Image (cartoon, rainbow, N blue to C red):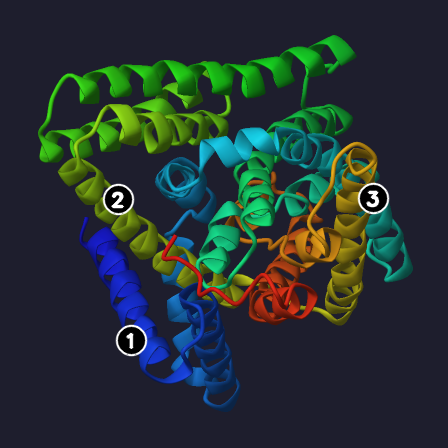
C-alpha cells in the first residue's frame, strides 16, 4: 500500500506542478501542456542518464512506472469516469439530429480506417525490415483508428466550433472507441487462433460477439441509467444524487465487464441519459449545479493524470532506427486513412443532406488519438512485435495530441472565420 500511495502522490504532485507551470507560463490547453512537459521531463532524465549513467535516475522512474498497469488503469479504472463526464455534457438532441453521420463514421468509417492502416503499416514494416504478421498489423489498425474522446473533448473546450460540427466530433469520439474495442477483441481472437492459442472464429462467432458487446452495452447503459434516473427523480438531495451518479458509473462498468459487453458504450449511454433527461426531469437547479461541478472536477483531475502518464511513457519505450522510421511513415498513413474514412461517409451522406463547410478537413485533423490507443497496444500479448507496435503507436499519439491539438484551433478559424468569433463555452 505504501508503494501505491507513493505512486499516487507522485502522479498527483507532478500533475499539479506541471499544471501550475502550464497555467502560469505556457498557457497551452491543459492536456497538451501536461503531455509536453512530461515528455520534456522524460527526455531530460534520459539525457542525464547519458551524461551520468551511474546515477540510474531514469531506471528508477521506469521501475516505478512498471508498477502502473496503464491498460488496467485506463480501461478498467479511469475510462468509465472520463466517458461519463464527457457524455453528460453532450446534447442528445444534437446527437440524434446527426446520428447518421456519427453512426457511419463510428462504424463503417472505423472499419475502413482499420483496413487501410492495417494494410499500409504492413507495407511500411516490410520496407523497413520489421517482420510483423498481417493480423497484428490489422490489430494495430483497430487500436490506432479510434479518435480518443478524452483528448477530443478536452480540445473542444478550448476552441470555438460550430454547433453542428461539434456534435459530430464529440459524438463520433464517444462512440467509436467502444466500437474499436469490439473490433480489437475480435481481431485479437483471430490473432490468437493464428498463433495456435485460440479457438476457431467463424463469421457467426464474430457477429455474435459484436452483438453481445455493442448491443449489450447499449441495453445495459439504458437499464442502469434508467434505474439511476428513477432514483434521482424520487428525491431532492444533491449529495445523494451525486453519489448515485458515481455508483452508476462504477456499477455499470463492472457489470459490463462481468457480462462481456462493452463498458465504454454502456457508460456513454448512461451518461447521455443522465446528462439530458436526468438533468431536465429528475434534478433541481441546485443538484444540476453540484453534479456538473463534481463531474467537471473528476474530468479535469483524471485528464491531468492520464496525459501526464502518456508523457512519461517514453521512458518505458525501446527505440531503434527502423522502428522510428516506421513510426515517422505511419503518421501520414494514419492521417490519410482518417481522411478517407471521414470523406467517404460524409460525401455519401452529403448527397442527401448538407454539411458544415470545411467539415472533412476539420474532422480529419481534429481526430486526435490518445490514451485509449496506448492502453490497447499495451494489452497486446507478449510477442516479438509488441515493442515495435507500442513505439509506433506512441509516436502517433504524441504527434496527434501535440501537433494536431495545437493547430486544430487555427485551422477551424481559417476555414470558418465567420462562425468562430464567439468565445467557446466552458463545456
Q: For the residues carrying marks 1 and 2, which lies nearer the camera in this image? A: 2
Q: Position of residue 246 (x, y in %)?
A: 24, 33
Query: Where does label 1 land, which residue?
Result: 20
> Which label number is shown at residue 333?
none
- Helix, strand or loop at mark 3: helix
Q: 268 or 353, which is in the foreground? A: 353
How many numbered discs sit on the rendered protein? 3
What is the distance, in whole Å, between disc 3 and disc 1 at their CAs? 41 Å
Query: Where does label 3 land, which residue?
Result: 116
The reply to whether dot 1 and dot 2 touch (C-beta < 8 Å) is: no
Image position of 227 with respect to 43: above or below: above
- Helix, strand or loop at mark 1: helix
Query: Where does label 2 land, which residue?
Result: 292
What is the distance, in whole Å, between disc 1 and disc 2 at their CAs? 23 Å
Q: 410 or 68, which is in the foreground? A: 410
Q: Position of residue 169 (x, y in %)?
A: 59, 46
At 29% from the left and 75% from the top, the residue drawn is 20
Is residue 203 shown left or right of residue 88? Answer: right
* Among the 4 quarters of the image, the one containing residue 423: bottom left
Image position of 333 with respect to 257: above or below: below
At 58% from the left and 45% from the top, the residue drawn is 164
Is residue 53 shown left or right of residue 1? Answer: right
Q: 260 or 243, which is in the foreground? A: 243
What is the distance, in whole Å, between disc 3 and disc 2 at their CAs? 40 Å
For marks 1 and 2, the one nearer the N-term is 1
Image position of 104 with respect to 366: above or below: above
Amino acid at each position: 500500500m505504501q508503494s501505491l500511495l507513493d505512486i499516487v502522490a507522485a502522479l498527483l504532485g507532478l500533475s499539479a506542478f506541471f499544471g501550475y507551470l502550464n497555467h502560469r507560463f505556457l498557457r497551452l490547453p491543459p492536456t497538451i501542456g501536461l503531455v509536453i512537459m512530461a515528455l520534456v521531463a522524460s527526455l531530460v532524465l534520459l539525457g542525464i542518464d547519458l551524461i551520468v549513467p551511474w546515477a540510474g535516475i531514469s531506471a528508477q522512474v521506469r521501475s516505478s512506472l512498471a508498477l502502473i498497469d496503464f491498460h488496467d488503469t485506463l480501461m478498467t479504472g479511469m475510462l468509465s469516469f472520463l466517458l461519463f463526464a464527457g457524455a453528460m455534457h453532450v446534447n442528445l438532441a444534437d446527437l440524434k439530429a446527426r446520428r447518421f453521420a456519427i453512426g457511419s463514421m463510428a462504424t463503417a468509417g472505423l472499419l475502413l480506417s482499420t483496413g487501410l492502416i492495417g494494410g499500409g503499416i504492413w507495407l511500411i514494416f516490410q520496407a523497413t525490415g520489421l517482420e510483423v504478421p498481417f493480423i497484428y498489423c490489422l490489430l494495430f489498425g483497430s487500436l490506432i483508428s479510434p479518435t480518443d474522446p478524452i483528448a477530443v473533448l478536452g480540445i473542444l473546450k478550448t476552441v470555438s466550433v460550430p454547433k453542428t460540427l461539434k456534435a459530430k466530433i464529440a459524438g463520433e469520439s464517444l462512440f467509436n472507441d467502444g466500437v474499436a474495442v469490439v473490433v480489437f477483441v475480435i481481431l485479437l481472437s483471430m490473432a490468437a487462433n493464428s498463433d495456435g492459442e485460440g479457438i476457431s472464429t467463424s463469421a457467426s462467432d464474430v457477429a455474435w460477439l459484436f452483438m453481445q458487446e455493442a448491443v449489450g452495452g447499449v441495453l445495459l447503459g439504458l437499464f442502469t441509467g434508467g434505474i439511476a434516473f428513477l432514483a434521482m427523480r424520487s428525491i431532492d438531495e444533491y449529495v445523494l444524487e451525486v453519489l448515485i451518479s458515481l455508483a452508476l458509473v462504477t456499477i455499470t462498468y463492472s457489470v459490463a465487464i462481468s457480462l462481456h459487453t462493452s463498458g465504454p458504450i454502456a457508460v456513454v449511454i448512461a451518461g447521455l441519459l443522465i446528462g439530458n433527461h436526468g438533468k431536465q426531469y429528475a434534478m433541481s437547479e441546485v443538484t444540476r449545479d453540484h453534479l456538473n461541478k463534481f463531474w467537471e472536477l473528476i474530468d479535469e483531475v483524471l485528464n491531468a493524470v492520464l496525459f501526464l502518464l502518456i508523457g512519461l511513457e517514453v521512458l518505458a519505450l525501446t527505440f531503434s532506427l527502423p522502428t522510428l522510421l516506421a513510426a515517422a511513415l505511419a503518421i501520414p498513413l494514419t492521417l490519410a486513412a482518417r481522411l478517407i474514412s471521414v470523406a467517404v461517409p460524409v460525401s455519401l451522406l452529403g448527397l442527401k443532406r448538407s454539411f458544415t463547410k470545411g467539415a472533412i478537413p476539420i474532422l480529419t485533423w481534429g481526430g486526435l488519438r490518445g490514451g485509449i490507443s496506448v492502453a490497447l497496444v499495451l494489452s497486446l500479448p507478449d510477442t516479438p512485435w509488441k515493442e515495435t507496435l507500442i513505439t509506433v503507436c506512441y509516436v502517433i499519439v504524441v504527434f496527434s495530441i501535440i501537433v494536431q491539438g495545437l493547430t486544430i484551433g487555427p485551422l477551424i478559424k481559417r476555414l470558418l472565420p465567420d462562425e468562430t468569433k464567439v468565445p467557446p463555452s466552458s463545456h
